[in-house]
Image (spheres, grey):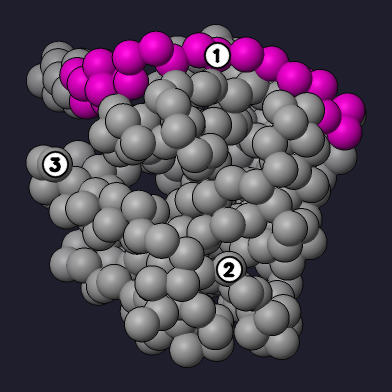
């Protein structure tokens, strides 16, 4: 029993080290604020200067777990607006309504309105990528360039086993790094469980975005995927083919390995291998992406 307890203690310490390392990569000049949008007390952080770039985290995640290793570099050329969505991180659960990609998209759009930002580049990871797609669909005038990382827009975009596992998802299955990151921000077990349940419910009821909606997106887009990702590389290729102004990059590794997402730090490159691809895409003049 003592050996088992020591093993659990070592795992906890290791996870804390990873988490602290992630937070140490926070960009200089970062400022955390709150705004009330559509009844949501939304948390966001601003860092850097230049053209606005909105960062949208993945499911059960925070700004830092998704983007902690990218923000310092991206803030050198862009004004970063990194958000935390309903029930995630610092943000509250609004009135308890079920989260949706459409509502998340409207919340981000409302925040940009409050910040007097007419247009911005949008970068979404995992479920944040699906939210970014909804921003491009519902608020196309807001979007200059679009980065969709490790994301999907239809159920066929991931293996059937994913949906089978999601139907019986348990709190114990949630990565410990996500739990620790959340509790470091909001030390409430109840809030943590609410966030988990919100995310699971949304995925259990995931509905496809029509192909025609994806084909109608006119913004220059960069599709990123790992060759062993949760969404299938074939789905990333399909998304790339459907968007009229898209580029595609497939990297070795899993879900977010290429961008240094927190749960992949042991396998991730340093600096993240996708960073130069993202930077090149963002600095190109409009129109050059498709030549």
Task: Please say whether residue 21 is one of the residues in the magenta stretch.
Answer: yes
Q: Secondary structure at mark 3?
A: loop
Question: Is residue 167 among what the camera can see?
Answer: no
Magenta stretch in the rendered image: 15-41
Task: Please say whether residue 279 is one of the residues in the magenta stretch.
Answer: no
Q: Secondary structure at mark 2?
A: loop
Task: State the residue in front, 267 or 68.
Answer: 68
Query: Between disc 2 and disc 3, whose residue precedes?
Result: 2
Q: Which of pointers 2 and 3 indicates the residue nearer the eye?
A: 2
Query: Between disc 3 and disc 1, whose residue precedes?
Result: 1
x 11%, y 47%: residue: 269
Q: Which mark is residue 32?
A: 1
Q: Which mark is residue 271?
A: 3
Above or below residue 40? Residue 172 is below
Q: Secondary structure at mark 1?
A: strand
Near mark 3 (Cα within 10 A), the count class, few <14, some 14-19 or many ≥20, is some
Above or below residue 270? Residue 189 is above
The answer to whether residue 43 is left or right of residue 163 is right
Task: State the residue in front, 86 or 7.
Answer: 86
Task: State the residue in front, 75 or 207.
Answer: 75
Query: Between disc 2 and disc 1, whose residue precedes?
Result: 1
Question: Is residue 2 among what the camera can see?
Answer: yes
Near mark 1 (Cα within 10 A), the count class, few <14, some 14-19 or many ≥20, is some
Near mark 2 (Cα within 10 A), the count class, few <14, some 14-19 or many ≥20, is many
Q: Are marks 2 and 3 in contact (CB under 8 Å)?
A: no
* Residue 9 locus on image (x, y percent): 20, 16
* Residue 5 locus on image (x, y percent): 20, 18
Please give the residue where the numbered disc 2 appears in the rendered image: 219
């Amino acid at each position: 029993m003592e050996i088992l307890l020591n093993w659990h203690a070592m795992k906890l310490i290791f996870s804390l080290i990873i988490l602290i390392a992630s937070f140490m990569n926070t960009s200089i000049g970062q400022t955390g604020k709150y705004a009330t949008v559509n009844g949501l007390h939304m948390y966001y952080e601003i860092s850097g200067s230049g053209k606005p770039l909105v960062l949208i985290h993945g499911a059960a995640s925070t700004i830092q777990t998704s983007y902690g290793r990218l923000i310092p570099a991206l803030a050198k050329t862009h004004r970063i607006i990194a958000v935390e969505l309903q029930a995630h991180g610092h943000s509250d659960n609004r009135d308890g309504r079920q989260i949706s990609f459409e509502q998340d998209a409207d919340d981000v759009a409302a925040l940009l309105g409050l910040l007097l930002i007419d247009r911005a580049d949008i970068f979404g990871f995992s479920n944040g990528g699906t939210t970014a797609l909804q921003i491009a669909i519902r608020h196309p005038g807001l979007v200059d360039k679009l980065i969709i990382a490790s994301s999907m827009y239809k159920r066929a975009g991931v293996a059937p086993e994913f949906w089978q596992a999601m139907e019986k998802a348990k709190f114990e299955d949630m990565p410990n790094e996500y739990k620790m990151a959340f509790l470091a921000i909001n030390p409430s077990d109840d809030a943590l469980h609410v966030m988990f349940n919100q995310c699971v419910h949304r995925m259990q009821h995931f509905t496809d975005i029509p192909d025609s909606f994806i084909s109608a997106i006119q913004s220059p887009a960069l599709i990123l995927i790992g060759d062993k990702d949760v969404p299938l590389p074939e789905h990333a290729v399909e998304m790339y083919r459907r968007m009229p102004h898209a580029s595609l990059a497939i990297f070795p590794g899993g879900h977010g390995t290429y961008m240094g997402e927190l749960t992949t730090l042991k396998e991730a490159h340093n600096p993240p291998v996708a960073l130069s691809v993202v930077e090149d895409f963002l600095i190109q003049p409009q129109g050059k992406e498709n030549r």
